[in-house]
């Protein structure tokens, strides 16, 4: 039997603020560049394995509408980091991807981001041909970890017990 997944209610938070002024397309991308494990193969096929802590590090690329409230919020945090890096409070974040099965059941996939900093300045684009990319601020972050959890299925179906004790099973 084939399966389907319905998505569209994703939430991105930075420092407990829900980012709502997202651009179109890939508005947010969380990526893990490093491997969690290093493997070496030696003479006669002998193998060694080592856990690589750097594999927990991730980047978040976030595209918001230029000049929006979220863009101003992020720019204020960036200014704080640049003005006194040693006293800067590291960024936190959360990405919640809600997935439905088409039958009313929803499952949340949650990434908890910690140890974050701004990786780059926000660039600008000038386009005289009407390109919409010039309306987007691209923010780049580095986080030290973002463990993922997958929750239990939640049903959004209405209780059909009609007030009967114990319900219909």
Image: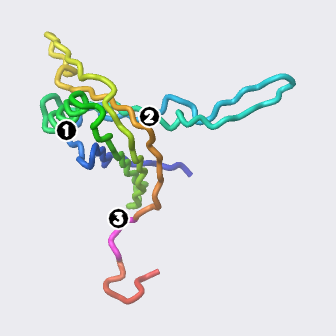
Write down the residue under mark 2: 58
Of badges 3 and 1, nearer the viewer stands: 1
Residue shown at the point (47%, 61%) measured from the top left: 152
The image quadrant of residue 13 is top left
In front of the other: 1 or 141: 141
Q: What separation in Å lies between label 1 and label 2 (alpha carbons)?
A: 22 Å
Of circles 3 and 2, the one toward us is: 2
Distance between mark 3 and mark 2 Cα atoms: 33 Å
Mark 3 secondary-structure assignment: loop
Magenta residues? 155-159
Q: Secondary structure at mark 2?
A: strand
Q: Which mark is residue 21?
A: 1
Q: Position of residue 143 (x, y in %)?
A: 40, 36
Q: In terms of sequence position, does the residue under pointer 3 or pointer 2 come before the other?
A: 2
Viewer-proximal residue among 137 and 101: 137
Please report the residue visible at 78 percent of the width from the left and 31 percent of the height from the top.
47
Q: Is residue 147 left or right of residue 70?
A: right
Residue at the disc numbered 3: 156
Quick one: label 1, few (<14), some, or many (20+) residues within 10 Å?
Answer: some
Front position in the image: 105 or 89: 89
Q: Is residue 44 left or right of residue 130?
A: right
Q: Which secondary structure dominates the residues rendered in magenta? A: loop
Cα gap from disc 3 to disc 1, whole angstroms: 27 Å
**Circle 1 SS class:** loop
| First reached walking from the N terminus: tag 3 or tag 1 | 1
Q: Is the C-beta separation of discs 1 and 2 under 8 Å? A: no
């Amino acid at each position: 039997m084939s399966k389907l997944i319905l998505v569209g209610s994703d939430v991105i938070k930075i420092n407990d603020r829900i980012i709502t002024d997202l651009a179109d397309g890939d508005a947010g991308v969380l990526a893990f560049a490093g491997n969690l494990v290093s493997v070496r193969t030696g003479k006669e096929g002998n193998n060694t394995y080592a856990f690589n802590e750097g594999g927990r590090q991730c980047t978040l690329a976030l595209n918001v509408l230029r000049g929006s409230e979220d863009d101003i919020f992020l720019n204020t945090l960036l200014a704080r980091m640049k003005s006194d890096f040693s006293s800067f409070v590291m960024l936190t974040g959360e990405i919640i991807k809600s997935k439905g099965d088409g039958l009313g059941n929803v499952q949340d996939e949650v990434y908890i981001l910690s140890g974050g900093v701004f990786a780059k300045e926000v660039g600008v684009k000038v386009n005289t041909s009407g390109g919409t990319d010039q309306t987007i601020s691209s923010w780049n972050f580095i986080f030290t970890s973002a463990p993922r959890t997958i929750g239990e299925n939640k049903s959004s179906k209405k209780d059909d017990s009609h007030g009967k004790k114990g319900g219909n099973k």
